[in-house]
Image: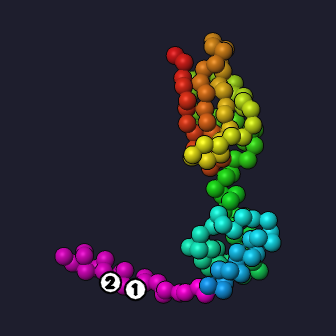
């Protein structure tokens, strides 16, 4: 029972003050995004409120740098060579030496944008095929044994 009381005391000490963001600020942030070439409809009011708060904490002039940071963080694999490098690092524990090759251009599905990567070894023509998503997720489509 004492540990519960201690946890409550800690939570009471670390409370946050609720701050409100005016609708005009959200509208201004949407205008800033439009001027910079972004589709502001892709961002909810809640996301824009977070961007405005980050903008204030960074002392930035607009929300655009915050949004750019979010997009880069969410999609850090931007080319086929980066996808191969990322996949190579992820599969480093394999005993065989694999050769990776990107097939086609960037594509997308319901889980996001991805690069299709084929892994080959000296024994087989195609060993495995992977989807390497721009956010870092890797899905193996098949593995030949």
Q: Residues within 10 Å of mark 2 (few under 14, many from 20)?
A: few
**Which residue is tagged 1?**
13
Q: Residue at image x 31%, y 77%?
A: 7
Most foreground residue, 106 or 136: 106
Q: Splitting the image into 4 quarters, where does residue 10 fall?
A: bottom left
SS category of the residue bearing label 1 = helix
Q: Residue 95, labelled with which disc? A: none
Where does the N terminus fall, quadrant-wise?
Answer: bottom left
Q: Evaluate if marks 1 and 2 touch, with contact meaning CB atoms under 8 Å apart.
A: yes
Q: Is residue 127 magenta?
A: no
Q: Which residue is mark 2?
A: 9
Q: Percent from the top left, x then y, of residue 20?
A: 55, 87
* Residue 136 in view, yes or no: no
Residue 16 shown left or right of residue 110 in the figure? left
Q: Bounds of the magenta span?
A: 1-22
Determine the CA span between mark 1 and mark 2.
Answer: 6 Å
Q: Secondary structure at mark 2?
A: helix
Q: Residue at x 67, y 52 (%)?
A: 75
Q: Position of residue 57 (x, y in %)?
A: 65, 80
């Amino acid at each position: 029972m004492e540990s519960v009381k201690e946890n409550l005391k800690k939570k009471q000490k670390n409370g946050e003050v609720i701050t409100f963001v005016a609708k005009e600020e959200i509208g201004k942030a949407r205008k800033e995004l439009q001027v910079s070439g972004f589709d502001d409809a892709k961002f909810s009011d809640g996301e824009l409120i977070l961007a405005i708060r980050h903008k204030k904490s960074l002392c930035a002039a607009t929300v655009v740098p915050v949004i750019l940071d979010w997009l880069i963080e969410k999609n850090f694999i931007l080319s086929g060579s980066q996808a191969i490098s990322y996949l190579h690092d992820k599969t480093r524990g394999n005993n065989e030496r694999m050769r990776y090759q990107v097939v086609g251009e960037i594509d997308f599905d319901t889980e996001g944008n991805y690069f299709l990567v084929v892994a080959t070894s000296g024994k087989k023509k195609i060993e495995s095929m992977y989807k390497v998503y721009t956010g870092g997720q890797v899905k193996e489509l098949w593995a030949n044994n």
